[in-house]
Image (cartoon, grey):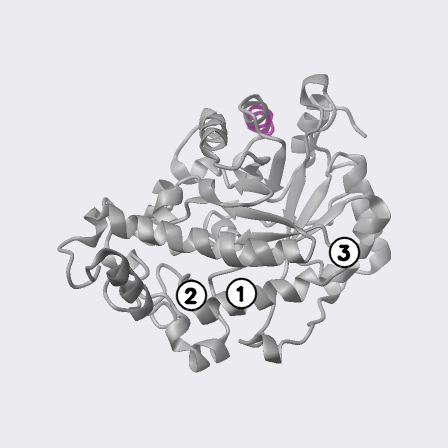
Amino acid sequence: MDKRKFLKLLGLGGTALAVAPGMLTACSDLPEQRGLKNWMWIHSVGDTPLEDLISRLENARKHGIDAVLMETSIGETPASEADWQPLAHPSLERLVTAGEATGVEVHCWLWQMPNNIPAIAEKHPDWFAVNGKGQPAHTHPAYVGYYRFMCPNHPQVHEYLRLRIKSVGRIEGLAGIHLDYIRLPDVILAEALQPKYDIVQDREYPEYDYCYCNNCRSLFRDQEGVDPLTDLDDPSESSEWRQFRYDSVTSLVNNVLAPEIRRAGKMATAAVFPNWESVRQEWRNWELDAYFPMLYHNFYNAGIDWIGEHVRRHIDELRIKKPLYSGLFLPALTPQELREAYKVSVEAGASGVSLFGSISEEHFTVLSELTEIR
């Protein structure tokens, strides 16, 4: 789900880089925790002047933040390499300049599969994922209007996404590209979110199950000899069909997106779900440089220990052993709970944390007590 929409649903504020001086503190150099790296997700800095960004990043770095992931919007890009032209990203470029001046890494946080550009739907309706009822996502999005997901198997979608990455990958000084929404829609929402949509998902229902477009059906038929829509009595019971969707997203990451990021000389990372089966996102097999599971425990009606359990589980399952950063949803954590969430994350093996949500001075007082200020 869109992090900002989640915040609105839960009545919470968003993340901001513009925090008050002295409020931004994170985990750093305790003897048993040396080498930890700490991140923040932030939304676009808009037209904030460079000198203000430098001041804010200096303060962030001073208090323990090593890297920021800035959400970046890209408009309609060409569908072919022949028509591709570099796009300007002034906000991101200005933040990169501020990062270079302060020693804070700047990464581009980029949505992948949702596409809410009207011209794309008009020109390329076949790009969009189709649910088990035969409804395309651009006309019948699941849950909310912005859930217009594209198909992970469409060759032109692959090229479109690759060129979007190329657009930001050319920025000198940008440390990495962070993939978000690199998945299909939630076939089953997290437990705490279902009542907010007045739904009960006790199994996989076809209106939330993707993708049954002609392209996916044809590929699966070639692979398994059956059409998942017409030949299976209950597609949700087919382990082969489920694995096909997992593999479709994994192939997009490993064979298209991550290689393009590395061609640009950037770090490849992704925000991922702990309940990966429900979004067809088998990220334990992805070939990335780091992983950011969004361990928003309150979405799953879970306690703080759940965070540590998932850190440990996901580290154990990773095919490629790279750093894993515990994504913490600060609006759902009291200062004392943040203390606990930090501890269980590091003790379970996380290489640091990534913070999302509005941050109070009380939260950072707790973090100051846990760490040495740089």
Relative to 330, 299 lies left or right: left
Q: Is residue 339 magenta?
A: yes
- Name the chief secondary structure element in magenta: helix
Q: Of callouts 2 and 1, which one flags the residue occurring earlier in the amino acid sequence?
A: 2
User: Residue beneath label 3, please?
Assistant: 95
- Number of other residues with Cα within 10 Å of mark 3, as a class: few under 14, some 14 to 19, many 20 or more: many
- Label 2 belongs to which residue? 150
User: Pointer 2 and pointer 1: residues touching (CB < 8 Å)?
Assistant: no
Q: Is residue 327 above or below residue 200?
A: above
Q: Nearer the viewer, mark 3 or mark 1?
A: 1
Residue at horizontal 79 percent and vertical 50 percent from the top: 99
Say which element carries label 1: helix
CA–CA distance in space, label 2 to label 3: 30 Å
Which residue bears the numbered disc 1? Answer: 161
Residue 147 shows in this picture: yes
Q: Earlier in the sequence, mark 3 or mark 1?
A: 3
Q: Position of residue 352 (x, y in %)?
A: 63, 32
Identify residue type, mark 2: Met
Outermost residue to the left: 233
Please give the name of the residue rendered at 23% of the width and 56% of the height, measured from the top-left corner. 224
Range covered by the magenta-colored residues: 335-342
> Could you tell me the amino acid type at mark 1?
Leu
Q: Position of residue 150 (x, y in %)?
A: 42, 65
Number of other residues with Cα within 10 Å of mark 1, as a class: few under 14, some 14 to 19, many 20 or more: many
- SS category of the residue bearing label 2: loop
> Which quarter of the picture shows residue 67?
top right
Q: Residue at x 71, y 22 (%)?
A: 369
Based on the displayed image, in which of its 4 quarters is residue 142 positioned?
A: bottom left
Residue 362 shows which numbered tag?
none
